[in-house]
């Protein structure tokens, strides 16, 4: 890869991480940044994101996500659906941004973009699953994620190498969070399973009218 290819890769990895957290916010920032010339470092190939139809669609979907993301149970369903949407959106933007490069470079950037977006999306889902019982914390996390997605997208557009450094740090943090989330969810699942077995044993005893005889 030449210097231009590496810079495109650096910027797209930051954009992909932001897309895994909030795809529609990332699309809006890029589209509006290009349309009103607010962000100067974006690849010219991303110009289709500045089309009014794309901006209106992304804006409507962002509004839906803004409200759905604040409600614990609804946000879990929304994130479940977007397990496919966010990484694919990152892949599409990666391909679009690298369309001036060769087929090999495009493939590498698309694969890395999708993988990074899936990682940030999975981390978001893990954190949200842990915080399901606290609506105030849940809503606060949602607002923080929106601000983060917008900030990282703007940083990737203006300073791609700095954004790459931030993204690499975030990926390491994401792995640690995913390990912690997996352990927490596993404990929760075991606790629910134990409660169910206790309840099932009590139900059987009640149905028989007496406790089972023990030797």
Image (cartoon, rainbow, N blue to C red):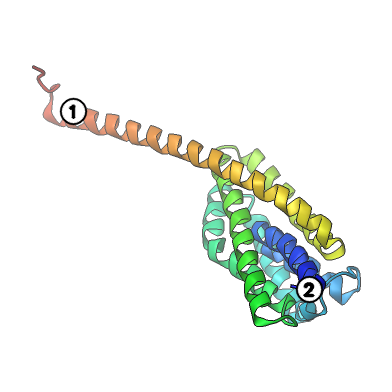
Relative to 124, residue 26 above or below: below
Q: Which residue is mark 2?
A: 2
State left or right for residue 145 relative to residue 155.
left
Q: Decide if residue 124 is in sight here.
A: yes
Question: Most extreme residue toward the front, as rendered?
Answer: 2
Q: Position of residue 23 (x, y in %)?
A: 67, 64
Q: Give the Cα distance between marks 1 and 2.
A: 74 Å
Location of residue 149 by image quarter: bottom right
Asked whether residue 147 appears in the rendered view, the answer is no
The circle drawn on residue 206 is 1
Give above or below for 178 relative to 111: above
Q: Residue furthest top?
A: 215
Q: Quadrant of residue 160?
A: bottom right
Viewport quadrant of the C terminus: top left
Quick check: 25 above or below 189? below
Question: In this orientation, which residue lies closer to the viewer: 48 or 141?
Answer: 48
In this rendering, position of residue 46 left or right of residue 70: right
Q: Secondary structure at mark 2?
A: loop
Task: Give the number of the disc on residue 39.
Answer: none
Q: Residue 210: where, in percent of width, then height?
A: 13, 22
Q: Could you tell me which residue is drawn at 56 percent across and 46 percent down?
A: 126
Location of residue 195 with respect to 86 vertically, above or below = above
Q: Helix, strand or loop at disc 1?
A: helix
Find residue 118 and report its image quarter. Answer: bottom right
In x, y percent, where is residue 177? 60, 42
Image marks 1 and 2: residues in contact by CB distance under 8 Å: no
Residue drawn where x is 91% and y is 73% of the image: 37
């Amino acid at each position: 890869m030449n210097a231009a290819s590496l810079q495109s890769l650096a910027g797209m990895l930051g954009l992909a991480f932001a897309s895994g957290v909030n795809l529609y916010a990332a699309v809006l920032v890029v589209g509006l940044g290009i349309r009103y010339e607010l962000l100067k470092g974006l690849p010219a190939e991303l110009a289709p994101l500045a089309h009014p139809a794309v901006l209106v669609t992304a804006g409507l979907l962002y509004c839906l996500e803004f409200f759905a993301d604040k409600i614990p149970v609804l946000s879990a369903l929304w994130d479940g659906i977007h397990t496919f949407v966010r990484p694919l959106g990152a892949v599409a933007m990666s391909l679009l941004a690298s369309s001036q490069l060769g087929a090999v470079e495009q493939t590498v950037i698309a694969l890395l973009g999708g993988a990074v977006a899936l990682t940030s999306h999975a981390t978001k889902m893990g954190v949200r699953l842990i915080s399901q019982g606290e609506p105030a914390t849940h809503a606060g996390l949602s607002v923080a994620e929106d601000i983060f997605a917008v900030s990282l997208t703007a940083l990737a557009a203006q300073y791609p190498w700095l954004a790459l450094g931030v993204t690499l740090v975030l990926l390491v943090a994401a792995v640690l969070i995913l390990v912690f989330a997996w352990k927490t969810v596993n404990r929760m699942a075991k606790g629910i399973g134990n409660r169910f077995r206790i309840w099932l044993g009590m139900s059987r005893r009640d149905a028989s009218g007496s406790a089972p005889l023990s030797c």
